[in-house]
Image (tube, helix red, strand yellow):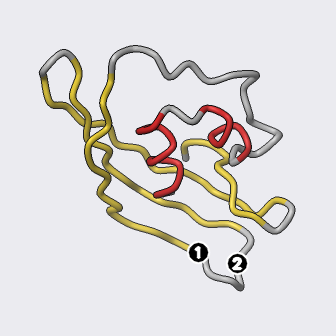
Amino acid sequence: MRSRFSAFGVGDAGYLLRTWHPSTRPPGVDLGGGLRWTRLEVLETTGGSAFHTEGTVRFRAHYVERGEAGHMEEHSRFARHGGDWVYVGAV
């Protein structure tokens, strides 16, 4: 989760696509739009250990857009794919 937030922050669309589950991965990611991601709060997690194949992360991501602070929240589902944790989608 944290690495994907960082990828949004630096505009690394390739990393975001590589860490997205193939069953839900879009053909591309548009990182334009003028958002500057500033902080991530992980609010809750389930699963996600070395013994799990699925997990969830509830988070709040803070941003600045046109000088105005804002945030978005999501409860995300992750799964192991090829041994790596990948984003599946919102719960």
Q: Is residue 46 above or below residue 33?
A: below
Mark 1 and mark 2: span between their CA atoms?
6 Å
- The image position of residue 9, as x and y in percent, is 41, 39
- Residue occupying the point 32% across, 37% down: 37
- The image position of residue 14, as x and y in percent, is 68, 35
* Element under disc 1: strand
The quadrant where residue 58 appears? bottom left
- The image position of residue 19, as x and y in percent, is 69, 48
- Which residue is the site of mark 1? 47
- Residue occupying the point 31% across, 48% down: 60
The quadrant where residue 74 appears? top left
Disc on the earlier residue, 1 or 2: 1
- Residue occupying the point 47% across, 37% down: 8
- The image position of residue 15, as x and y in percent, is 65, 43
**Callout 1: few (<14), some (14-19), or many (20+) C-alpha neighbours within 10 Å?**
some
- Which residue is the site of mark 2? 52
Pick the residue in front: 25 or 33: 33
What amino acid does circle 2 point to?
His
Q: 56 left or right of 75? A: right
Circles 1 and 2: CB atoms closer than 8 Å:
yes
Residue situated furthest left in the rendering: 68
